[in-house]
Image (spheres, helix red, strand yellow):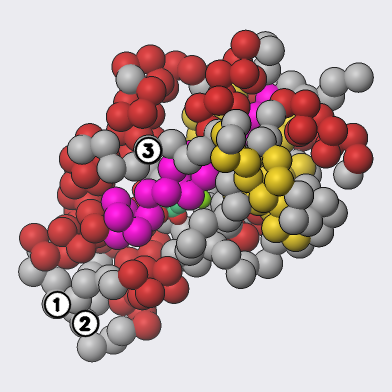
Amino acid sequence: MSRLRALIFDVDGTLADTERDAHRVAFNRAFSEFALPFEWDVPTYGKYLKITGGKERLRGYLQDHPQYPQLSDSEIREIHRRKTALYGEIIAEGIAPLRPGVKRLLDSAAAAGLRLAIATTTTPDNVAALLQSNLGEGGWNRFDYIGAGDIVPQKKPAADIYQHVLQRLGLAAADCLALEDSENGLRSALGAELAVLITQTEYTQGQDFSGALRVLDQLGEPGQPGKVLQGRDASESVVVDLDTLEHWLAAG
Ligand code: XBP
Ligand code: MG
């Protein structure tokens, strides 16, 4: 019997690969506009991705680099506001397509009557920009609830955002599946007692995904399957659909 009533998607890294070429670039453009004497190269950004939330990431970076101007909270908020605007411009160029299988799974879940939600650390405007760019005007409304950014006191890996989304959906964790790309996201969703499917990225490969339902390189498309990377079913090729998810949830 089907147990799945909702899919809850992370955004950055899960819906689309946004970090290296969109968030990172937007941060660097904002740093340059504010005449800050540093920029984040690809490895540096990867290191600081472990701090979730852009404002928190910048604060963490400055704490590790006392030689740079130490910004006040309001200065960080101002720089981050500009970064958000720049991110929206970059995304509007269409550089961050949905990852393979995401649109297919969204469509089939909606057609099957499942509810769709988002649980993300990123700013709501960023979610809107990404959905608009990939799904058009109606993109935001395809989701029953979108929980994003500062709506909860503690960002991932705290469980707050997933607990908040579950509460808004009015569903039990056992009826839902979270889709994530990172260890921080996995810990957050597991903390809310959700089953979690990981599709890893260039930045998150090698992280500790213990406790995940499955870890894949991607959801896959017909003719271009994803690969199970570790644990049960490792090295199997699969195009993840609702039947696959039900099967994995039942099998554990
Ligand atoms: C990823 C994040 C975000 C983005 C930057 O969130 O940690 O902070 O890197 O976005 P998720 P902001 O994977 O949960 O979507 O600058 O708006 O915080
Ligand atoms: Mg993510």
| Helix, strand or loop at mark 2 | loop
Q: Position of residue 205 (x, y in %)?
A: 57, 64
| Helix, strand or loop at mark 1 | loop
Which residue type does callout 3 highlight?
Pro
Is the residue marked by circle 2 packed among few (<14), some (14-19), or many (20+) residues within 10 Å?
few
Is the residue marked by circle 1 packed among few (<14), some (14-19), or many (20+) residues within 10 Å?
few
Location of residue 9 (image quadrant) = top right
Among the two numbered marks 2 and 1 on one chain, the one whose residue lies closer to the N terminus: 1
Q: Which residues are magenta?
A: 6-24
* Disc sitting over residue 124 in the figure: none
Task: Work out whether 101 lies above or below 159.
Answer: above
How many callouts does the rendering have?
Answer: 3
Q: Is residue 210 visible?
A: yes
Among the two numbered marks 1 and 3 on one chain, the one whose residue lies closer to the N terminus: 1
* Residue tagged 3: 97
Mark 3 CB lies closer than 8 A to ligand 2: no
* Disc sitting over residue 37 in the figure: 1
Q: How far apart, in angstroms, are the residues tagged by discs 1 and 3? A: 32 Å
Asked whether, in this view, residue 209 is left or right of residue 80, the answer is right
Closer to the camera, 109 or 241? Answer: 241
Which residue type does callout 1 highlight?
Pro
Q: Position of residue 28 (x, y in %)?
A: 20, 63
